[in-house]
Amino acid sequence: MAAEPIEGPRSSERLLILALERFGVWLRSIVVCLCGALGVVSADAAEVPLALSLLVPAFLACGVRLYSLRRPRLFPLALLWTLDAAVVVLTGLSQPVIGGEAANVMVEAMVGISVVAFQYEWATRPVAGAALAALGAGVSVLGDVLSSPGQGPDVVPLVRMLIQVGLSRAAYLIIRGLARAADRSAAVRAAARREMEVAAARRATEREYLATLHDTASATLLMVSQGDGRDWSWLPPRARQDLEAMSAVPGFETGSVDLAALLGCVPEGEGQARVRLKTRIDGPLAIPSGPGLAIFNGVREAVTNVARHAGVREAELRAWTEGDGAVVELSDAGRGFDPESVPARRRGINGSIIGRMHAVGGSATVTSRPDTGTRVQWRWHGQALAPQAGDRAQATGVPHPPRAQVQHTADVRFIRGRLLYGTQLAVLLISLVWQFTISLRRLVVHQDMYRPAWAQTAAFVCLAAVAVIGGAYLLRGRRIPPRVRWLSLGSVLAVSAVCAFTLPPEQSTGAPDWAFGVVGWHALFLLADLRAGVFAAFLGAHVGLNATAVFLSGEPTVTQWAIMGISTIGSCGFQLSVGVLMTYLLHGTAPAAGTAAAREEELRTRERIHEDMQRDHKERYRALTATTVPLLVGLGHGVLSPHDEEVRLRCGVEAARMRRLFAESDAVLDPLLNELRACVEVAEHQGVTVSLAVRGRPGEVPVEVRRELIDPVAVILGRTRSTARVTVVWTPRAVRVSVVSEDCAGGRGTDEAAQAPGRATNAQVAVERTIRGGSVWVEAGWRRPAASGVDLT
Amino acid sequence: MSDNAPVSVVVVDDHPAILSGIEAWFAAARRPITVVAAGDSVREAWTAPGSTADVVVLDLQLAEGGPAFGSLRRLVDAGRQVVVYSMRDDEKTALNCLDLGAATYLTKSEGRDHLVEATLAAADERPYMPPALAGALGTNTRADRPQLSVREENVLIEWFQSESKELVAQRLGISVRTVNSYLDRVRIKYANVGRPARTKASLVARAIQDGLVDVDDL
């Protein structure tokens, strides 16, 4: 029965079916055992052994069925069906054995409730349920015939039984339909939420990856491209480390780390770039590894910045606990700078230090003014993080969906709302059908018994009005206002009283008492959203009124009491059990369904995030495999020498490409120009004079096209020794990015520009090359989508 | 003016270093160019000896404030040949100056390579097209722009991109002369549209006379 979570019924429907099945089995078993026991007690002593031989197997069958609820897969369905059929047949046959009016009523109650219960037990197999109902009908006819030979079978109870069975099935279908709808709309909302969460997780991972790349491969390649004739002994291990960092998927670190120990390993740099760290750390500082690594990597980058920009060779590193978090501070007394004037593209501060901390839920601040030194502070607080990307996320390695609790509550409320609507609809249907079939027939047939008859008719109309008014609210999708509800309930109780006191007491709960069995349904409809206790109180009042009426008219006989008692159990007891079931559905099944849905949802989200992260990572890594990875491998294993000019040029090109990649995530108006500038800055850093000119009005260019448009520029600039001109021309039809180098080193570079290796060559971008003497001119053009059929050249 | 006659120039720029730089370039020119007056105000162009100079080299961004379009218009209306020489490297300003009737528009980064030739061309009422201006014309989307052929537009853009007519010629498989004739033709087309000015009319007349364009082309 437990189907695939995606293909089969979803949480609400699944749990609803389960709850109804349990309800059916328990209700039937209790009724059969109670009534059966009463029957044995009331039977003549001579008939007891035969009655027992019929009823004990029926009790045992009920017991087996109850046990099967706990071990659903233990028994074959055919066996269970046979047991159910046996219960009906055995109880039906006990009717002639026990004999008497009491037996008739008892057996009718047992069989009647059993066939109703079967509709819920076998809800997912309607044919089995219908067959059992037919069997029940047959058995009750047989019982009647056997117990009163000579009389033909009474059609009325038979029709009543069929109506009840039909109503049970209809109620089930209504509630299941609404549970399904709730599941569907919850799934739709969950899918939207999942997309958001997956996107957020991907962005966070992307940022982290770029920050890692910036501190590792990009920094190394830039250093190689700039330097010549220095000590390169540090390079091979560093290049190997960089490769490792690039291939590791960020966001999958687990557990917690001692930040104090990590900070003790912050490299001070070597030679001229060495920064002596004065360390004052109050350890140990255990924090989740995500924030711990973010702080560690940030501090590493900040120390490099001190060496590069501060003009001092000393810095102070302090760390201490604050609340349940940690604070780390790096300060130097160097030249300082104006943080406002640092362009957004400078990734050292924005990406490696601030962005990385934000990604793990912490914060980092940089305080500096020209000539006053610089202070960088990292803060991480456990509690601020706990509800969202907190410890759980670290433990599982995947960011946990935020605000899960709020959404869970909303889901539960939604499912509960739909289930309530469904049960109300079902009970309303039962009330109306019952009133206008079973009750109406009784009212019409027994008109002459009522004193006065008009009172009973008025009560009937009043009851119908209650159902119609309540139904009107319900069908318009509105709640019944409290005043209307309590007025209606009062009317229902009044109907009960009127009918009880205008009926001959000996006929109470008998055939002419049309109201006794139906008012409970009306009340249940009005009280559906309240706890079962309120409904029980109403039923108590209802039964009390009828008992009072009987009692006031004189002492009833024991048999009369017994028949009344069994009728009460058969109708009001059944109604109460339905009330309890509804309370259970709304307060037990709905939250459970919400929780189950949330759990399934979380699992799916996590799977998606995991998949997407893996795929993104492969994608990114693939983009670098063709270019950066071979370089780092060569440098790491000494195959490529940093003394070789060609190697240094390639490193320069790769560094420029990476800078462009970093610039991709900047939020700027003209991303093409922004990414182009990132490449130009690398070249200018190497001492190349680059003039950059733009003409025309900028427009939208997809990121993969931008990559191809700019790549030739990265390649040519990386090989240019003195002067280059970079232009962007926007025409209504096309965008054309061009680079002219007056002295481009090596012919290979120009080949590379025309056909960047390892990239999916995009037919949309046309690259054209012209070489004249030392000058190389490469232009990449992309036809803008608005244009049609205009050739670029 | 015959092709070797000396040319007199008045230079209006508020930066002394630029003034002396320009004078040095003119002094080294293949054809005698005399700077008859130089100063930081347009007055130099209106008072003797500047008032009789053949060409005015005008910095659009003088100390007074915004671009000196008014001064340019008055000079052009008086029939003066004005080479606008500006820090501003945007197409809007370039197109405005051309529409007002400036002989040409040069950015200061192009000065070393193009100012002398632009000045001589202005003196002879011949068209001259520096790369920055070519870029502006090649991407012009204004409604009143003249109709250019695809080839003309390409030559403009590629000249802007490469700053080398040899490279453009090589890429397009044509001669440098042809590249020049495309550029001249575009310049004449621009002189033939927009606000009427005597300088523009004489540019067109001279071009027809030289056989650069046909009357039918316009």
Image (spheres, helix red, strand yellow):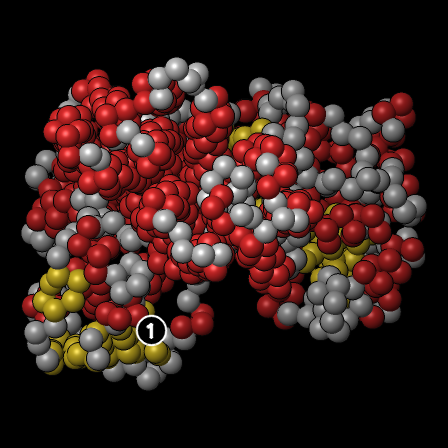
Q: Give the image location of residue B56, x and y in percent.
A: 78, 57
Please give the name of the residue rendered at 59% of the width and 54% of the height, measured from the top-left corner.
Answer: A498
The one nearer the camera, B86 or B153, is B153
Q: Which residue is mark 1?
A: A365
The quarter in which the N terminus of chain B is drawn is: top right
Q: How many tags in the picture?
A: 1
Is residue A295 in sight in this rendering?
Answer: yes
Q: Give the image location of residue A211, x and y in percent.
A: 29, 54
Answer with the quarter of the image where residue A308 lies.
bottom left
Q: Give the image location of residue A652, x and y in percent.
A: 29, 45
Q: From this view, report whether residue B139 is shown above or below residue A261.
A: above
Circle 1: residue type: Thr
Could you tell me which secondary element the residue under label 1 belongs to? strand
What chain letter is assigned to the residue under label 1? A
Please give the name of the residue rendered at 73% of the width and 54% of the height, measured from the top-left corner.
Answer: B93
Please give the name of the residue rendered at 49% of the width and 56% of the height, measured from the top-left corner.
Answer: A553
Is residue B12 in sight in this rendering?
Answer: no
Q: Give the image location of residue A349, x and y in percent.
A: 33, 64
The quarter in which the C terminus of chain B is drawn is: top right
The one nearer the camera, A16 or A264, is A16
Answer with the quarter of the image where residue A695 lies.
top right
Please give the name of the residue rendered at 80% of the width and 30% of the height, measured from the top-left corner.
Answer: B147
Left or right position of A190 against B155: left
Q: From this view, report whether residue A412 is shown above or below residue A758.
A: below
Left or right position of A716 against A257: right
Left or right position of A202 against A36: right
| Number of other residues with Cα within 10 Å of mark 1, as a class: few under 14, some 14 to 19, many 20 or more | some
